Image (cartoon, helix red, strand yellow):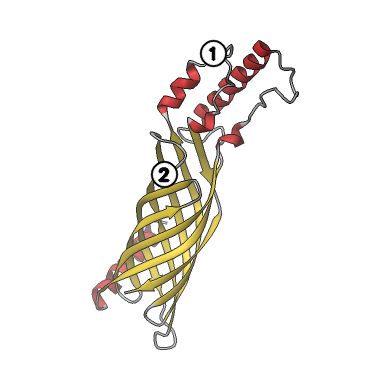
Amino acid sequence: MLRSTFVVVITIVASLELAPAETRGVLRVGVAPVALTPERDTWLLGSRVDDAVRAYNAAAEAYDRAHGHAPGSAMSTEPIDRRDLGVSTSFFTLAPGIEAGTRHVFVRVEAALAFGESHRSYGLGFYPVNLAVPMRRGTLTPYLSAGGSLSWLDDTRIAGEIGALFGARVAGGMRIGRRLAIEIGYSAYAIGGLVDRDELDTMRTYDPRGDEPPPRPEAALSGGEQRGAVDLSLGLAI
């Protein structure tokens, strides 16, 4: 395995040295679904999500008992489970960037900007492995890319939260001529979440004897992980 990796690296370096290097600006515009679901073993979030679910359900039960609401009645507070603290949205994505290398092997760095109905993210994408095979005298160029992105994640309905989103992605595309490209991406793994410490404190100090039901925990903590998402984008080279 180590020997094969070494051979691949040497081949890439040699191709970069033998072929003329070039740099071009690129812009990708597309759509990408996000469905982060917390699991028990999700890094950093798993145990916190379970604690938030247990705390909310206990507070909801205490609130119903204090106000005489029978379980399952119209006035009772419904319990939640771990899935209620996930993040689900569809992003419109903008990714201006730079590609540097040769016609066959290049590196891509891009801004990762995404906008959804209630969420948005701003970050950086880095694709160190990009392999292209020009065909038909360069009028068609299929390519493969591998890399990932790290972004700040924001819920526009909440003020003061801290969020992050990380994703590993591979993509296949077709460049048409020198300007246009169509790309299909596959997010092998993504993890992200949001935390609002003020809302967490509000949950901890909640008094079930008051007039208001307990605050929903998704305003204080949400996120999870995602595997196997597919996205589509159109590209333009400058």
User: In the rendered image of this protein, does residue 143 appear above or below residue 126?
Assistant: below
State the residue at coordinates (56%, 53%).
228
Tell me if mark 2 has few (under 14), some (14-19) or many (20+) residues whose alpha carbon lies within 10 angstroms of its own.
many
State the residue at coordinates (47%, 35%).
43
State the residue at coordinates (50%, 60%).
31
Tell me if mark 1 has few (under 14), some (14-19) or many (20+) residues whose alpha carbon lies within 10 angstroms of its own.
some
Check disc 2 and report the residue beneath it.
Answer: 153
N-term mark: 2 or 1: 2
Residue 147 picture quarter: bottom left
- The three-letter amino acid code for the residue at tag 1 is Asp
- Along the line of sight, the residue nearer the viewer: 179 or 126: 179
User: In the rendered image of this protein, does residue 75 appear above or below residue 11?
Assistant: above
- Along the line of sight, the residue nearer the viewer: 218 or 129: 218
Q: Secondary structure at mark 2?
A: strand
- The three-letter amino acid code for the residue at tag 2 is Leu
Q: Secondary structure at mark 1?
A: loop
The answer to whether 234 appears left or right of 100 in the picture is right
User: In the rendered image of this protein, does residue 61 appear above or below residue 48?
Assistant: above
- Along the line of sight, the residue nearer the viewer: 78 or 129: 78
The answer to whether 128 appears left or right of 136 in the picture is left
Check disc 1 and report the residue beneath it.
Answer: 207
Viewer-nearest of discs 2 and 1: 1
The answer to whether 162 appears left or right of 89 in the picture is left
Residue 29 placement (x, y as % from top left): 43, 65
Q: Quadrant of the C terminus?
A: bottom left
